[in-house]
Amino acid sequence: MASDIWRSPINRRDFLKGGAALGLGGSAALIAAACASPGVSVAPVVTPSYPKAQIDGDLEFFNWSQYLNPDAITGFAKHYGVKVNQTNFDNMQSMMAKLNAGIPYDITFPTMDFVDQLVKANALLGIDHTQLANWSEVPSYFNNPWYDPHAFYSVPYALWTTGIAWRTDHVPDTLAGSWNDIWTLAPKYSGKLFLLDDFQEVLGMSLLRNHKDINSGNRSDLDAAVSEILKIKSNVGKFSTDDITNMNNGSAWIHHTWSGDIYQVIAAATHPEIWRYETASEGVPTGNDTFVIPKAAKHPGTALKFIDWMLDPVNARANVNYFGYPQVTTSGIDEYQKLVAKLPFLTLSLDTAIHGLREIVPTGAKLQLWDSEWTKVKAG
C-alpha cells in the first residue's frame, strides 16, 4: 500500500478550492495559478525571481515552536548584526492563512505537499543554489524532488515519522507496534492519551488501522475511520500539537506524536529511560519540511543567508542535537544516526523517508470531504 510518490508525479490540482472551511480563506485566489494537467507534476511556468544572498534587513522568521536551535538563531543575528523576529504557527493551515493574508514573513517552513501548491501558485521567490556556499551538503535526491522540480523554490529542512510515544512508568503494557495500540490503551488510560490536532495525521492513522489508503478520498473509508475515532474520543485527553509540553509536564502518558518531538522529551527528561516510541506495522507516515522564501518577503537576501547558515555542517549538527530530527544535509543525517544510536526506536534513514507513506494535502472536493469528516471528529 505504500506509495512511492517521491519518485512519481502526483496530480495536485486546485489545492484550496473549498478551503475556507479549514481556515484558509483567500487561498483560492493565491492558488489559482497552481492548477496543472491531471496526473502531471510540472515545473513552474513563471521564471523564478531570485534574491541576492546579502543582508537586506532584519529577519521575519515563521516556524513551528521549538523547531530550530535557538543558538543558531542567536549566532546568525550576532554574526550579521541583525534581529530575528520569531512568530510561530500550530499547523500548516494556520501558516497558509497568514501567508494568504499577505503578512511579509521572510522565511517559513512548509511541508513538502504545501510547497508543491505554493510553487504552482507562484507564491515563492526562487532560491539560487549557486549563492548557497553549503548547497553541496544537500543530498542529491533533493536537487529535484517531486514537490519542487529542480528545487527552484525550496531547500529541504527535516525528516520525520509519525508514531506513538508512551512512558513506561505509567504504562507498563507491552505495545504491539500497531495503530490499534491507541484503541487498546485508550479506555485503560482515559484522559492521559492525547492525539495530534492535525486532520491528516488523525484521519490518516485511522485509515491505516483499517488497512485503507492514507490519502483516501472514498467517503465510506473516511466514514469508517471517523466512526472508529469517535469510539475512543471520550478517552482522549486532548487533541494537541503541543506534544512536547504535554509529555514534559505529565499531562499525557501516551501521545500520538512526531519522532523528533519524542527525542526532545527524552533529552529534557530527568528519567529518559521511561520513554518509548513506536511506529505502526499498518503504515508509517513520513515526510519532510522545507525552507522557503515567500514572495511577500521584505528581506529575502537575509533569508537566503539564513538558509545557507543552517546548511553549514557545524550549525546543522548542533541543530540536530537540539531538535532531534535528521536535518536534510549530509552532516545532519550523519549526526542524527549518532544521536539515536542508543535509541534504536528512533532510527530513521534517508531511504526510509524517501520510500515512506506520504500524507498529501487533499484538494478540491476531496478537501471538502476531509474537512467535513474532521468536523465530525472535533464536534462529535
Image (tube, rainbow, N blue to C red):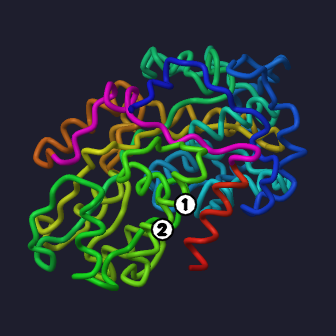
Quadrant location of the C terminus in the rendered image: bottom right
The image quarter containing residue 362 is: top right
Residue lying at the far front in this picture: please name it: 220
The image quarter containing residue 284 is: top left
Residue for badge 2: 227
In reply to whether residue 350 is colored magenta, the answer given is yes
Quadrant location of the N terminus in the rendered image: top left
Residue for badge 1: 223
Location of residue 229 with respect to 36 vertically, above or below: below
In reply to whether residue 120 is colored magenta, the answer given is no
Say which element carries label 2. helix
Task: Kindly check if marks 1 and 2 are in contact, taking CB atoms under 8 A apart as contact.
Answer: yes
Front residue (pair 373, 219):
219
Magenta stretch: give its range.
Answer: 345-366
Q: Residues within 10 Å of mark 1 (few under 14, many from 20)?
A: some
In whole angstroms, how far apart are the C-alphas of marks 1 and 2?
A: 6 Å
Say which element carries label 1. helix
Q: In the image, 122: left or right of 205?
A: right
* Residue found at x 69% / y 39%: 302
Q: Amino acid at mark 2?
A: Ser
How far from the left and from the top, in percent, is residue 180? 27, 60
* Residue found at x 50% / y 21%: 142
